[in-house]
Amino acid sequence: MTEDGLVVELVGAVTVARVQGELDAARAEALRAPLDAAPGPHVVALLIDLSGIDYLDSGGVHLLLDLHRDLSRRGFALHLVRPQRRTPSLVLDVTDVGEVIEIHPDRETALAVMDPSEAS
Amino acid sequence: MDLRIAEMDWAATPLGPRDTWSPALETAVGICVNSRFPMLVLWGPEEVMIYNDGYRPMLQRKHPAALGGPGAIAWAEVWDVIGQMTAGVRAGGAATWSEDMQLFLERDGFAQECFFTFSMSPIPEDGVIAGILTTIFETTDRVLSERRLGLVRALASAGSDARTEDALFGAIARALRAAPDDIPFAHLYLFDREDGAARLALSAGGPAGELDGAPEAIRRAARSRSPVELPIPSSALALPVRARGATDVLGVLIAGLNRHRPFDRDYRDFLDLVTSTIASGIADARAFEDERARADALEALSEAKTAFFNNVSHEFRTPLTLLLGPIEDALGDAAEPLTAAHRERLETARRNALRMRRLVNSLLDFSRSGEGGREADWQVVDLGSLTAQLASTFDSAMRSAGLTLRVECAELPQPAVVDPEAWERLVLNLVSNALKHTWDGEVTVQQTDEDGEIVLRVTDTGTGIAAEELPQLFERFHRVEGSHGRSHEGTGIGLAIVAEVAAQHEGTAAVDSDVGRGSVFTVRIPYGHHRVDATRLAHPVDAAPVLAGEYVADTIVWEAGDLVEPAPLMPGNGGAAGPDARRPRVLVADDNADMRAYLVRLLAQEFAVEAVADGTAALERALTDPPDLLLTDVMMPGLGGVGLLTRLRAEPSTERLPIILLSARAGQEASVDALAAGADDYLVKPFSALELTARVRANLEMGALRERATAHQTALYEREHALVEELQRALLPDRLPDLPDVEVAGCYLPASPDDAVGGDWFDVVRLPDERVMVVVGDVVGHGLRAASTMSHLRTATRAYASEGHDAAGVIDRVSSLVERTGVGLGSTMLLACLDTLTGEVRYASAGHLPGLVARRGGQARWLEHALAPPLGLASAHAARAVDDRLDDGEALVLFTDGLVERRDSELPDRLEELARAAAGDGSPEALLNRLVAAMDVAEKRGDDVALVAVERVPARATVELELGGRGDDLTAARGRLRGWLAEAGAGPDVSDEVVLAVGEALINAVEHGIGDGEGRIWLRGTAYADRLRIVVRDSGRWRRQGPARARGHGLRIMRALMDEVTLDMHADGTRIELQRRTVPA
């Protein structure tokens, strides 16, 4: 089990938020405000890096979908990095999150798509 | 759908933004979205549609536009019907239940005929009906397949009942007209069997000849042997009519198509079945007609033959006389004597001409005597001399047959007045008869005066005649059955003539005989002086024999030729008469060696003949190696012809063997008897060689024809059977549910392989409250109707049980449903609900046999005291629920009466037998096998049998948690679960997934079930041998909490990770059951 954690950094025009530990319903409520506020003035998109999470349930999925809806209303794009662990990765597929939010296999691929100038 | 419902902009709909939805609406939507049954919510006065994934296929392209829109718009094409129903529900508030309702839905661009079974339940809110929850199943496939099968069956029975083509066409037209749904109109054109022209045989559903392009389509369909579409605007096909597997196209069926059904594979298969069924019917009807035509021809032949005999005798005499005259002249020509060689030839000619004249004369005599007797030519003769001369003409024939002829004709005291020609016939018949039936010893012809009468005795040392034959001996055409005679040619009227001549002379003819010792024929006549003037008595005429030559010639012919030929086979030694296997094989059974030889000789020219000497040998031969035809004598020692016939008809291998009976009994009555006994044909002795071979040939052809017709019938039957079986598979539970906490076994034995569809059924269903429902039922009747009734009862039982009614409640409701609809009236059922945790059983019965509790290694016991009347016959609330308990190692067995009812045993004895057989060890499946074996129902049962057994499965590891409603201890709960899973031996991946799925179930309980921490959540996990089962229950009403957002992600996750997820929402809480196999299945 990884310690729960949230690290937010700016890579070019993209805010990258790295979530670790368990992303269940309770944790999702706790993360909602910080993630919602993460994209700053010069940012076009938010990338939530889930590669390090151990647990993802429908509460976490709801958080992601809510963020997507709120951010797009404000003009931001939301992308995800796929969890490496099998079960949480499966949850994203089962809930068809990928149909709404773009999911990338890793952080580099994600950034290359989101901000080509920065990645190269 | 849940995501789509969540994302939907509801503000734009009459329902308004989701935040504003009422709890009742949210509840309805929750039930709908979480159900895997197709469900639809119609909400508000606008009847706004909200539906789930199961429902989507019914909308086809109307989805997603239909979501959130008024039902009246999405279902505009059927709203005239549906709208009335919803209005009714909203007005009256009563739920509806519609079965197989026909609706024409707009699909694939046209109005399609579809069928649905659905219920509409009102959803009340604040005292009014705010919406309607509809659960709906599309039953189009089943209804269509039943409907189409019905038509095919009607056509098949039209074919099997019709005796003529015309009758068949009438029946087919009626069947088609009675079921116009799938073939709105039809015109059957058949190709003439002679000129090949297509002729209209029948029309159903509209006049023929109005279809453009029909002749061309008929030609093309016949040539290509495949369906051809008629040009637009006809929606019709030209279908070649031919029996399945046959190449001959008998005709073409122009079949109109149901404009409201797509022409899919099922439709195509159905039409194929229709045409092949019609073709089989035609083949059968033609076979019948041919058979009857042949029978008519035979009858006409027989009438013509009688007329012919009546007339021809006269016609023959003249040419015969003209033939004999010159021959006699040539032979007696002293002036120009013949050479030895010529004489010999002419003597042969004369002998045979004489013989022929004699036969003709006999026939003539006979027909004359039948017409009232010919005028007697009374002459005064020295009868002693005449009789002696007549008898002596047989001297050489007797000698060549190795017999001694004694002629002892005393000189009579006075002359006699007789008809010399008639007397001659009398004497010659008697002597030749004696010669024919005597193999060694002597024939004595004795004539004396006894008490003023002339007494003629002809005594032989021949075969003799059985006492029972004696009374009929002098009847016309009577021939002694099985007599050991020399010749079987002849007219069979010889002794009748004797009797008639004796009577003509005011005398008598009598016979005295001992079988094996010989016979004495005695003729007594008066001198008959009154017949002439006294003056003539003084001048007896010299009556030289005129006929004797013919009679003797006759005996010489058969002595010389007919009998020296030995029978090809000795009695009883079997074996084929010829190596030619391609020739039809005829088995001949006759105890008379001569008759046998005669038959073999006659038939061997055309057929492979085998002969046996008695009925028993014939039976054995016919069964070991069935011939193509059996020709058997009626009278045989031991097993006679009729007995043989009966035995052969009872055996499958010979039930259709053509059989011809040979008998001496003439007359309509005799033939009716023979035909009633199952003979194909009947020949009365004497018969001509020609007639025999003609009949044998005709019956062989008929047999072959019948085989073909039967093959058609069988093929048709098998096809229909396959269809019925397919239907059965669709109706019976295809497999029992795989439940972790009970081991289940069930089996269904059809009444016979021919009757795969019966009315017995069983079912095992998990109920929302942990329990398992086990039910067995017996629908009155068999066949398709019973199977369909069974399906209805099963569905209703499931529905009522999942509504939460207990055993008695379910039975009461099913019973009142049956009473209302009349479907399944008098059917019985036994229903038990088993709590797999505690073993408690609650059961109720509707007229059914009690259930049995089998105990491993112990005494079985009965579940009794629950009896109520059969379904539909009880007053309301008649069912009684009785409680019992299933301990570890106990299995509950429910069965139908086919298992125990038997004609030869009393029911209590059979039940006792069943209870005894239940003792023992093993799984429910082994238990069922044991019961079936012990009750000996594997074969020849008259009824179908359904039985089902359940036994609880013990648990390995369990976990029980009780959580508060706030959901703040979920992390801890997941920890407990991980511990339990480790104890149960689950690997890390399985553990992760199960923890996640259970976590979702808990979230669901927190979010929807509990109001602000006041409620409780219970979790029970049980690990069985090969799987895990977790049940999460909460105490609250299902309610929505938090902002409007995508619902159902949790459910989706659970379904993805677990093998089975069952979600039930009830007034007193929500229950989620999860199951997962721990080892790969």
Image (tube, coloured by chain):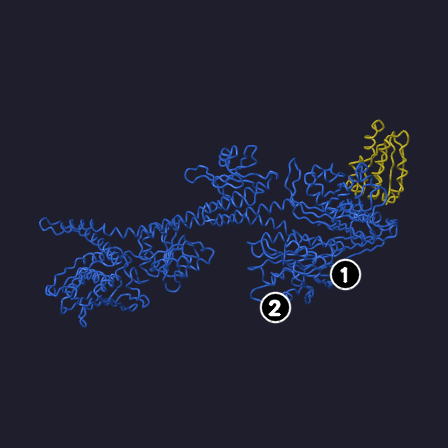
Q: Secondary structure at mark 1?
A: loop
Pointer 2 indicates a residue of which chain?
Answer: B
| Left or right relative to B391: residue B646 | right
Q: Is residue B403 above or below residue B585?
A: below
In the picture as drawn, the residue positioned furthest to the top comes out as A117
Q: Nearer the viewer, residue B787 or B303?
A: B303
Foreground residue among A115 and B191: B191
Q: Work out whether B460 lies above or below B328.
A: below
Chain coloured blue here: B
Residue furthest to the left: B335
Q: Are marks 1 and 2 in contact (CB under 8 Å)?
A: no
Residue named by callout 2:
B909
Residue B209 place in picture, x, y as percent: 50, 35
Please name the residue shown 41% across and 37% down the image.
B195
**Crowd band around label 1 with a 10 angstrom C-alpha radius: few (<14), some (14–19), many (20+):** few
Q: Which residue is mark 1?
A: B838
Q: Colour of chain A?
A: yellow
Q: Chain of mark 1?
A: B
Q: Amino acid at mark 1?
A: Thr
| Quadrant of the rendering where the N terminus of chain B is positioned | top right
Kind of residue indicated by mark 2: Asp
The percent coordinates of residue B634 (x first, y second) are 37, 60
Tell which circle, 1 or 2, labels the residue nearer the N-terminal end.
1
As drawn, is B61 to the left or to the right of B389? right
Left or right position of B289 against B52: left
